[in-house]
């Protein structure tokens, strides 16, 4: 009897040990990401700073993420979600060479459709002549491919996400360089572009409001980023001079 | 008979949950791939991380694996004969991560997997450091 009990005990221990392996884990709920991205508020909020491929147990949305080799890559502005690392200012739409940002060999160009000044945590490659740096911000002056144009109607909806967000955006003080995608002709069909002549609502975060002068030149002309689809464009050139600015000490974040 | 049964049970349990097979030197850094693994651990330490001693782990991820923690993040470091085999093991590494935030990346012939099962690294900064500091 004792012998039988011992055997049963041994079998039970063995089954328990084999049935609950320490390192087994289903990956059915895993969602793949690559690069820095925001964390949903429902998951605690903030920023995930893992630069390489990784997984979470929450989903990505369609407007702010693009697929990169099966992983979700964030194309939005991380500063809007509290990112506090090195950052680079851009104005208007532009391509993102994802493979260069995440340092892999899967050639992949995606497009950022955020209108107006915004940040990313990467800057264009030094050799990339499709970008011009003016007034501390990068402007895309290249020839946008059909893929950019085709996706634009759907992807410009990302601005409905960012427009109401209150955060410190970059302040761009210069005229856009010639060839900037926001003013060049022939991109898409600028159907019935309406210029709003009223003074633009310049939203300056309270943090930077002190010591800021706003100059709205007249007449103003803007054909900007809202190209296509009968957009009312309010993104007129607005010259903002921020006193005691003295920043732009960013380093390449790679 | 009783002794044999206990021995069998112990052997099976040990095989399933992993027992230290360290071979001298730094605790837990032994095994065939000890040098490569030691390089990873040293890089972590130089970068300011504080890894616990790694202990041998029996896992489907690889034959030469050791596990431990860095902060409260679980880590698994496996060494393979070739970089290609380490790369191919990334999927198995993600399975080891399970239903939590984590990563599994090959660095040469070493696979590094990290899992934040205790939710101690909500910003992912530790996991990012684990991957970035490891020698390529």
Image (spheres, coloured by chain):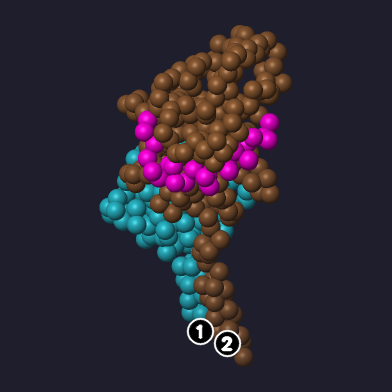
Chain colours: A brown, B cyan
Whole-Å distance between the Cαs marked 2 and 1? 7 Å
- Residue B70 vs residue A63, the one in the foreground: A63
Residue at horizontal 65 percent and vertical 13 percent from the top: A214
Callout 2: chain: A
Q: Position of residue B33 (x, y in %)?
A: 33, 50
- Give the label on residue A72, or none: none
Can residue B41 be seen here? The reply is no
> Badge 2 is on which residue?
A3
Callout 1: chain: B
| Secondary structure mainly formed by the magenta segment | helix
Determine if the magenta segment contains residue A219: no
Residue at horizontal 37 percent and vertical 30 percent from the top: A142
Is A254 situated above or below A28?
A: above
Q: Position of residue A253 (x, y in %)?
A: 45, 29
Can residue A190 be seen here? The reply is yes
Describe residue A232's horizontal placement relative to residue A129 as left or right. Answer: right
- Residue A24 vs residue A95, the one in the foreground: A95
* Element on which disc 2 rests: helix
Is A124 situated above or below A213?
A: below
Q: Quadrant of the C terminus of chain B?
A: top left
Q: Do the residues under discs 2 and 1 have CB atoms within 8 angstroms? A: yes
Residue at horizontal 42 percent and vertical 64 percent from the top: B60
Q: Position of residue A162 (x, y in %)?
A: 62, 37
* Element on which disc 1 rests: loop
> Badge 1 is on which residue?
B1
Is A223 situated above or below A158?
A: above
Q: Position of residue B85 (x, y in %)?
A: 31, 56
Q: Residues in magenta?
A: A142-166
User: Callout 1: few (<14), some (14-19), or many (20+) C-alpha neighbours within 10 Å?
Assistant: few
Residue at horizontal 64 percent and vertical 22 percent from the top: A197
């Amino acid at each position: 009897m004792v012998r039988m009990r011992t055997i049963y005990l041994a079998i039970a221990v063995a089954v328990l040990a084999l049935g609950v392996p320490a390192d087994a884990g289903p990956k059915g709920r895993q969602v793949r990401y690559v690069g820095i991205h925001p964390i949903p508020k429902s998951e605690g909020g903030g920023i995930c700073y893992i630069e390489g491929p990784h997984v979470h147990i929450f989903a990505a949305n369609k407007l702010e993420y693009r697929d990169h080799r099966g992983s979700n890559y964030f194309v939005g502005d991380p500063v809007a979600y509290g990112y506090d690392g090195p950052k680079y200012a851009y104005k208007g739409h532009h391509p993102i060479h994802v493979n260069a940002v995440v340092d892999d060999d899967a050639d992949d160009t995606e497009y950022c459709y955020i209108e107006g000044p915004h940040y990313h945590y990467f800057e264009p490659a030094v050799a990339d002549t499709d970008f011009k740096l003016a007034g501390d911000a990068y402007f895309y002056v290249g020839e946008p491919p059909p893929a950019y144009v085709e996706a634009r109607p759907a992807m410009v909806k990302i601005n409905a996400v960012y427009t109401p967000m209150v955060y410190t955006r970059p302040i761009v003080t210069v005229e856009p360089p010639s060839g900037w995608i926001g003013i060049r002709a022939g991109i898409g069909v600028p159907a019935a572009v309406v210029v709003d002549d009223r003074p633009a609502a310049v939203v300056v975060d309270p943090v930077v409001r002190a010591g800021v002068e706003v100059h709205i030149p007249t007449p103003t002309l803007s054909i900007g980023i809202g190209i296509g689809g009968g957009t009312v464009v309010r993104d007129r050139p607005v010259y903002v001079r921020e006193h005691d600015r003295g920043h732009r000490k960013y380093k390449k974040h790679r | 008979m009783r002794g044999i049964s206990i021995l069998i049970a112990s052997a099976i349990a040990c095989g399933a949950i992993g027992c230290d097979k360290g071979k001298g030197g730094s605790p837990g850094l032994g095994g065939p791939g000890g040098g490569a693994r030691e390089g990873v651990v040293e890089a972590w330490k130089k970068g300011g991380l504080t890894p616990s001693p790694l202990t041998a782990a029996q896992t489907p991820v690889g034959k030469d694996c050791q596990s431990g923690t860095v902060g409260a993040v679980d880590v698994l470091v496996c060494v393979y004969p070739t970089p290609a085999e380490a790369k191919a093991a990334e999927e198995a590494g993600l399975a080891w991560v399970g239903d939590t935030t984590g990563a599994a990346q090959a660095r040469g012939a070493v696979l590094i997997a990290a899992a934040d099962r205790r939710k101690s690294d909500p910003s992912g900064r530790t996991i990012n450091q684990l991957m970035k500091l490891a020698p390529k």
